[in-house]
Image: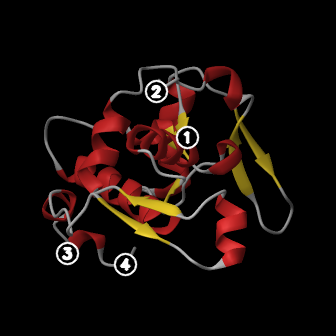
Amino acid sequence: MANEDRKDFNDMLHDNKDMPKFQTITDQKSIEKYGGSRMYFAPPIYYDKVMKRIPYGKVITVGKIREYFAKLNGADFTEPITAGIFVSIAAWASYQRTDDETPYWRTLKANGELNEKYPNGIEAQKEKLEAEGHTIVQKGRKNIRYYVKDYEKVLFDLK
C-alpha cells in the first residue's frame, strides 16, 4: 500500500463495504481452481477479529483464514484478493492504534511466507516472530523471500 501515513486504517477496518456477502461465479477455470462457484466476501473487521485469536508462539496463514470463513458460511471459498488487502488493513489499523493490538505478524502468506506489506516490512515481522521463538529462513537468490521454518507445526487451528 502507498501513503500509509496519510490513511486512517481504523476507518477502513470498520467500513464493511456491504459485506459479508456471497457471489456465484460462472468462470469455469475459477470454479475448478477454487473448488466451487459459491464465493464468500468477509469484511475487514472479520479478519481483524480472527487475527486477534492467534496466540503467542502460533501462526496462521491467510489461506487458513479464508478456509475458515468459507466453511463457517457454507461457501466453496473466500475471495482471495480482498482477503490479502483486508489482512493488511488489519495490520496497519493495529499499528496506528495505541491499544487493543492485533498480533498481525502471526498471520502469514501462503507456505509460511512473511508479508512485506505489513508495517515496517519483513524486518519488523521477522523480529516479532523470532522474539516468539520462530526460526525465519531465507529462500531464493535474486527474488529473496522469508518464511517461518516448519510453520505447519505451529499453525493455530481456528476450528
Q: Which residue is mark 1?
A: 64
117 relative position to 21: left or right: right
Q: Which residue is mark 4?
A: 2
98 relative position to 137: left or right: left
Q: Is any atom of residue 43 visible in this view? A: yes
Label 4, label 2: how far apart the Cα atoms are: 31 Å
Q: Are marks 2 and 1 in contact (CB under 8 Å)?
A: yes
Q: Which residue is mark 3?
A: 6
Q: Residue at x 49, y 48 (%)?
A: 66
Amino acid type at image mark 1: Lys
Q: Between residues 2 and 35, which one lies in front from this camera angle?
A: 35
Q: Residue at x 21, y 57 (%)?
A: 13
Q: Between residues 118 and 82, which one lies in front from this camera angle?
A: 82
Q: Is any atom of residue 117 visible in this view? A: no
Find numbered disc 1 in the image and state the secondary structure of the residue it sits on: helix
30 relative position to 118: left or right: right
